Amino acid sequence: MMDKSYNLVLVVLSVVVATLGGYVAVEIAQRVRASGIRHRILWTCLGALAMGLGIWSMHFVGMLALTLPIPVWYDTLFTFGSVVAAVAGSAIAFFIFNRTTVGGWLLSFASVAMGAAIAGMHYIGMAGMRMGGNVIYDPVIVGISIGLAVGFSFVGLALTRDLLNTGAARGSLLKKMGAALVFSLAVAGMHYTGMAAAHLAPPAAGPRPTGYLLPGTYQVGLWVAIGSIILLAIVLAVTRFVRWTSATKSRFENLLDLSPQVVWFGQPDGQISYCNPYWYQYTGLSERETVGYGWANAIHPDERDRVVETVQTALQQGKDYEVEFRLRKNDGSHCWFLARGRTGHDATGEVDAWLGIAVDIEERKRAEEEAWAASQAKSEFLASMSHELRTPLNAIGGYAELLALGIRGSLNADQAQDIARIRRSQQHLLTLINDVLNFAKVDAGQTEYRITAVPVDEALRDTESMIAPQVLAKGLHYSFKGGDKSASVLADPEKLQQIVLNLLGNAVKFTESGGSITLSTASVGNCIQIRVADTGPGISAEKLDRIFDPFVQAERRLNQPVQGVGLGLAISQDLAQAMGGKVTVESEVGKGSTFTLELPRAPRMDPTDVPTKVLADSALHEGSHSESPEETSNENEREYHDA
């Protein structure tokens, strides 16, 4: 008999291949159990091939690990037969994996069949050995090798069955590794026991074997082992990836199914390709009635064209969109929804999909309508009350003035002083009520606007006579720095004057005696800015954000009472916005504040279109400037102060 030995590297590689093949088989078996009928056949075939590759590679590399003093070849036909036997044994295993329940008798039968297939693979491969000597088998050891194949196959199948029944329970990784190792022992144990049963007779002199043969060299075994490991690793990676994507897809689908809002996906041209179950439950439409552009039929006819136009515009521009509309419910009623759509892009940045959601906002809409109705009722009430209160206040003022004139007889000094106090209080209260009335009208949308081209210089000069008494009474320095006399703004003349007077009145109110107020204009782009700057105490940063809110004042101290209820700036802002402008503020504590009214510029006026009054005023101002050396320094600047 010839001496034989084994290459340790190839032996280790053969066991590694068998174990990896068993692990891949268990992984694929889990995919088989979790897949639908359509994909189950594909996964079964892939699993049988992967497991068969692992079994056959272990066997063939194990044979190539055998080192003999003579050259050995392997017949390709017998080698292919051993591959078929390995795949057949793996197919038996996956037949078991496919079944929901596997009893003991079926498991035993499958173990015998699988063990026989493994043994057949081994001995068919051994029969393909071509060398000068003969192979003699010990029948006892051959029986032991077959028994090992059957026994380990039974254990491996049983472990895999339990693993599939428990799913991803705790310790599943150890169970998978244990099942893979048992399958490896079934193949490796049978193989090396079978090799031990073979006794090789010395070669006889004769010619070299002929036919389609494979050389039995170490290099061939190494390449077969490495190639099998790489292929099995790829199959394992693909299986894991598919398993991960399937789990992610399943979670995503469950999330869409459970979502209490409409979710949809669309094609690049905007046609809907998917809607979650909430849509069909809410609208009662079928999938055929929804996909494409059928979804638009569920939108209220009053909003349908607007919604479709919004979506089409977003499609053309490739931008996100947001739109509110009433959606028809399955009972025929309509509820308000807020829909948002967003583009999906491919690797090149092109739009390849649309996705969006629609949320029920019926309660929010109802709350907004109720709030609007309450606000309107409040504004109407304030307007009515303000009107009713002004009537008796005007009477009080009229009678106080008659008494002051001595209509009811002459007054002594104390009586005259009391009448003066009554008139001041009446004027103060009347001012407050007028503010409330103006705010109520603006808030209720009852204010009418007569937008026209208003010459800025003329409008601002007219405010001087109105604010001058307050400036002089408080001992303030006032200056007006006009701009382009031909510049005009698009505004309502009365509303423009009201805003400027509010800003000037606030400046006078909050500026201490000896301070200064400056009214100026500037052109910025297509707008005209009217600035009111003062040297008052300034406004802290935390109050700047709320300074235009109703009933908010920058300063209110008990020891320094200030007239008004904090509506002037709120009214001014509302009036400015209604005329297409805005009021802004810049302030620094201790240095004063600058309020800026910005309004859109009107087309430039031709001198022949300027009213005669404006030209006369301009000539008068120019004449007065020529008489005063102080004023000739700047013909557009006027100033006065308390002597």
Image (tube, rainbow, N blue to C red):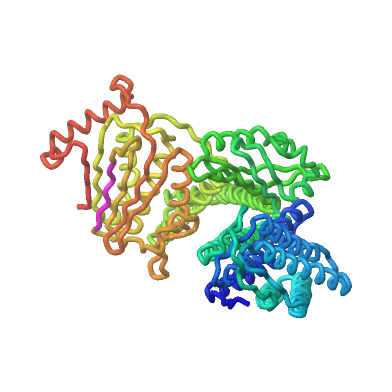
User: Does 382 sit above or below residue 581?
Assistant: below
Q: Residue furthest left?
A: 629
Q: Main secondary structure of the magenta part?
A: strand
| Left-right relation of 22 to 447 | right
Residue at figure coordinates x 48%, y 55% from the top left: 549
Q: Quadrant of residue 563?
A: bottom left
User: Does 611 sit above or below residue 542?
Assistant: above
Q: Residue furthest top?
A: 608
| Left-right relation of 290 to 581 | right
Question: Residue 257 lies in magenta, yes or no?
Answer: no
Q: Quadrant of residue 216?
A: bottom right
Q: Is residue 183 visible?
A: no
The location of residue 642, given as percent across then percent down, is 22, 52
The location of residue 212, given as percent across then percent down, is 62, 53
Q: Which residues are magenta?
A: 515-521
User: Does 606 sit above or below residue 235?
Assistant: above
Name the one closer to the observer, 241 or 300.
Answer: 241
Q: Quadrant of residue 290?
A: top right
Q: Is residue 289 visible?
A: yes
| Left-right relation of 584 to 349 | left
Name the one closer to the observer, 539 or 337.
Answer: 337
